[in-house]
């Protein structure tokens, strides 16, 4: 039995959608069992017609850890996650993942059936994945998510946060080796975000390799590893600390947007402006790059959001002929 919307989609032959083989540049899909020390991609590219959605992306997700994929619209996050889940074949490269029934996948949105109750959604998922003792497992996960009182409510009548929690525990129910979550916290209230992260951390603690896409860099900073994508290409990768440490130059905070050349290196954050000054070729901060306004600003210690923003600025300036 297959579940095209919630599980791993099948091809015409009934097998999980995967790439064909190593010859001719076709990708290899590694259904490597459940004992791998990592799941992920190696030099994976994906074309949609003439559009390159992923460009030789390498990504690793380790069991027992949460790995985050971040990026703006069109960055390639969903494409990468669909490849990992077996829902999309890559055009080139290698994908290493467990067997289809050891993958849990939450697509963008809640991934639940609105016309089924909470309990019926979980019962359906338990049947698809042949979960042992489904009643006990369902009760346990409903309690984890704080949804016990809503088990007979239609999923379509849940609040946004409750619906997302249902989607997450449905993807976790069969205790997958690889749990792939596409923006599980987008559009939910702060309290629900905290509760969702508790569920995600529990899945990792139970041994799953958790991969999630998020547009919230403060969330990504909680992950063990982060991959930042931009237009289908790797922008930055590593632990949050490694990405921040690799950022060149300095960041200052200003009350208003700077003028001149510094404006190209400035971005608004909260109620103030951040501006980046690149390293001077001689080795010190390039204090003259942004002029007096930057010199008068407050020097701040960069975080993950600053480091990813600077990486994007460096790439943009290089592409437009600017001097980073």
Image (cartoon, helix red, strand yellow):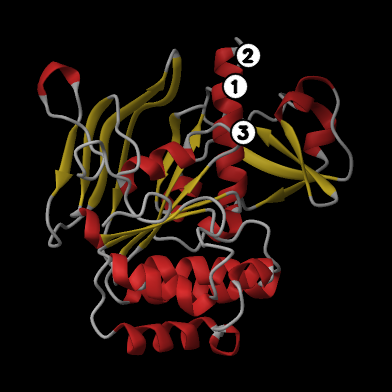
The quarter holding residue 126 reads bottom left
Whether tag 3 and tag 1 are in contact, CB under 8 A, the answer is no
Whether tag 2 and tag 3 are in contact, CB under 8 A, the answer is no
Where residue 79 sits in the image (x, y, percent)? 43, 37
Decide if residue 4 is on the left or right side of residue 34: right
Q: CA–CA distance between discs 2 and 1?
A: 8 Å
Whether tag 2 and tag 1 are in contact, CB under 8 A, the answer is yes
Q: CA–CA distance between discs 3 and 1?
A: 20 Å
- Please tell me the numbered disc located at residue 285: 3
Whether residue 153 is situated above or below residue 19 in the rendered picture: below
The residue sitting at the right extreme is: 256
Q: Report if residue 249 is visible in the image.
A: no
Decide if residue 29 is on the left or right side of residue 171: left
- Quarter of the image with the N terminus is bottom left
Viewer-nearest of labels 2 and 1? 1
Whether residue 173 is situated above or below residue 259 in the rendered picture: below
Decide which of 245, 175 is in the foreground and name it: 175
- Please tell me the numbered disc located at residue 322: 2
Q: CA–CA distance between discs 2 and 3?
A: 17 Å
């Amino acid at each position: 039995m297959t579940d095209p919307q919630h599980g791993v989609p099948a091809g015409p032959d009934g097998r999980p959608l995967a790439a064909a083989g190593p010859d001719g540049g076709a990708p290899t899909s590694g259904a490597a069992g459940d004992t791998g020390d990592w799941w992920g991609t190696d030099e994976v590219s994906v074309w949609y017609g003439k559009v390159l959605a992923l460009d030789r992306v390498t990504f690793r997700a380790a069991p027992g850890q949460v790995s985050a994929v971040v990026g703006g619209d069109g960055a390639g996050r969903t494409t990468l996650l669909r490849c990992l889940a077996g829902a999309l074949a890559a055009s080139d490269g290698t994908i290493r993942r467990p067997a289809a029934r050891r993958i849990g996948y939450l697509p963008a949105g809640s991934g639940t059936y609105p016309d089924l109750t909470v309990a019926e959604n979980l019962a359906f998922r338990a049947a698809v994945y042949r979960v042992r003792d489904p009643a006990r497992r369902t009760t346990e996960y409903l309690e984890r998510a704080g949804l016990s009182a809503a088990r007979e409510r239609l999923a379509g009548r849940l609040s946004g946060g409750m619906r997302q929690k249902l989607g997450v525990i449905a993807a976790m129910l069969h205790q997958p080796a690889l749990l792939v979550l596409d923006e599980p916290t987008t559009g939910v209230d702060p309290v629900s975000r905290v509760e969702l992260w508790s569920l995600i951390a529990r899945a990792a603690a139970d041994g799953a390799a958790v991969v999630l896409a998020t547009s919230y860099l403060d969330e990504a900073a909680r992950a063990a590893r982060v991959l930042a994508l931009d237009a289908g290409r790797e922008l930055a990768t590593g632990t949050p600390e490694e990405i921040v440490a690799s950022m060149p130059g300095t960041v200052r905070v200003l009350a208003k947007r700077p003028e001149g050349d510094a404006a190209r290196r400035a971005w608004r954050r909260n109620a103030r402006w951040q501006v980046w000054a690149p390293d001077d070729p001689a080795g010190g901060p390039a204090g003259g790059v942004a002029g007096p306004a930057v010199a008068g600003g407050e020097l701040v210690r960069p975080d993950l959001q600053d480091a990813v923003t600077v990486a994007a600025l460096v790439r943009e300036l290089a592409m437009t002929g600017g001097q980073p």
